[in-house]
Amino acid sequence: MNSLRRIRAIFGKELIQLRRDRMTFGMIVMIPLLQLLLFGYAINTNIRHIPVGIVDFSQSGLSREIVQIVKATQVVEIRSYFESVEKAQAAIASAEVRAVLIIPEDVDNRLARHQSLGFGSPPATDEETSQPIAQWIADGSDTIIASAIKSLRGMPLAELLDRPVNRVTPTFEVTLLYNPEQRTVVNIVPGLVAIILTMTMIMFTSAAIVRERERGNMEMLISTPVRPIELMIGKIIPYIFIGVIQVSIILGLGRVLFHVPVEGGLAQLAGVTFLFITASLTLGLVISTIARNQLQSMQMTVFVLMPSILLSGFVFPYEGMPVAAQYIAEALPATHFMHLVRGVVLRDVEVTNMASDVYWLALFTLGGLLVASLRFKKRLE
């Protein structure tokens, strides 16, 4: 009986402590709720509305019908029209669009050639049966996007255009850029840089201020002439070098073990990586000024990490997410760095062509330092 009484006393104490710890109680509710919403809405392998462009060299009624038929599938969404293949490929490289449909000038003749091969006609030659009526050029670095575009190459255009069905069906040719073999590892390794940096950088700095308080160093910091902004900058500088080491390990081993190419310049890669590391570190500092102990800082880190993995485009394409999930993704530094690191490493894109992502990371870093400094100053008061 005495043992049960003592267990009941400890049980009551833990309930009271949990009730007073509002942060932990909130995480108990929010973490499963967040997982439910993310897995239920954000994860979607049946991708739709892929942003694509059109290069129409025909400018005929048939070419416009083909565009409308492709659009009606809802697999793609027409975003841009380009005058040349070169401009279209540049748009794919900068991720303005994920694929481009090129309609040749002789599209009417190509379709007529297929239709002339009806029943009773001489056997078709290899050139006649293999010649497509149009061509898709797609970003092959994302295997899910590439598979969705490839699913369109066998569309029964003869039936959809209300023409006789022949034994030769017009098809689209599909050319995959940057990863023609559709190797998943090519897409995963650069994305892994963003995920690992998010995990480690936020985790390291989220406990920085909390650790000072738990070790009794806060009084010493108050008595020194160190300004809050100086303290914040001094806290993050050592971890920048740790982040550089992690990036070198991931991309270096990825190249050696999995033959993942690094197409872009190292200077550009170093620049965007530095921006993301500082953005993640400042986010960790903000968490550190909010959390009361290291347990709370770890809980809040997990709360940020899960959306960064699921919404940044690391596993599931950004285009396949609902609009609300895309808005949340745009607020995360990992989403913007995912665009940058894949663009530089896989497609050799100039950073100036992805300036919006660079600006967002820079503003996020400055804003995070400002918020962390103000909150730390408030605590000193």
Image (cartoon, helix red, strand yellow):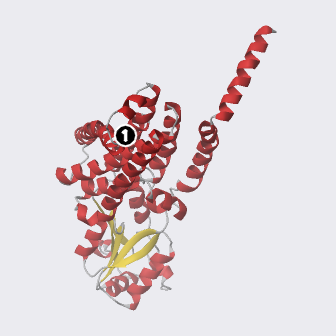
Q: Residue 311: x, y in percent?
A: 47, 53
At 38% from the left and 82% from the top, the residue drawn is 121
**Extreme-top residue of the structure:** 2
The picture quadrant where one finds residue 244 is top left
**Amino acid at dot 1:** Met
Q: Residue 216: x, y in percent?
A: 44, 25
The one nearer the camera, 350 or 187, is: 350
- Residue 110, placed above or below residue 242: below
Query: From the viewer's perspective, is 35 left or right of 77?
Result: right
- Residue 358, placed above or below residue 200: below
The picture quadrant where one finds residue 206 is top left
- Residue 334, placed above or below residue 78: above
Asked if residue 338 shows in the view, the reply is no
Count up the numbered dots.
1
At 52% from the left and 64% from the top, the residue drawn is 323
Q: Residue 82: x, y in percent?
A: 30, 79
Residue beneath label 1, please? 201
Query: From the viewer's perspective, is 331 left or right of 110?
Result: right
At 45% from the left and 49% from the top, the residue drawn is 308
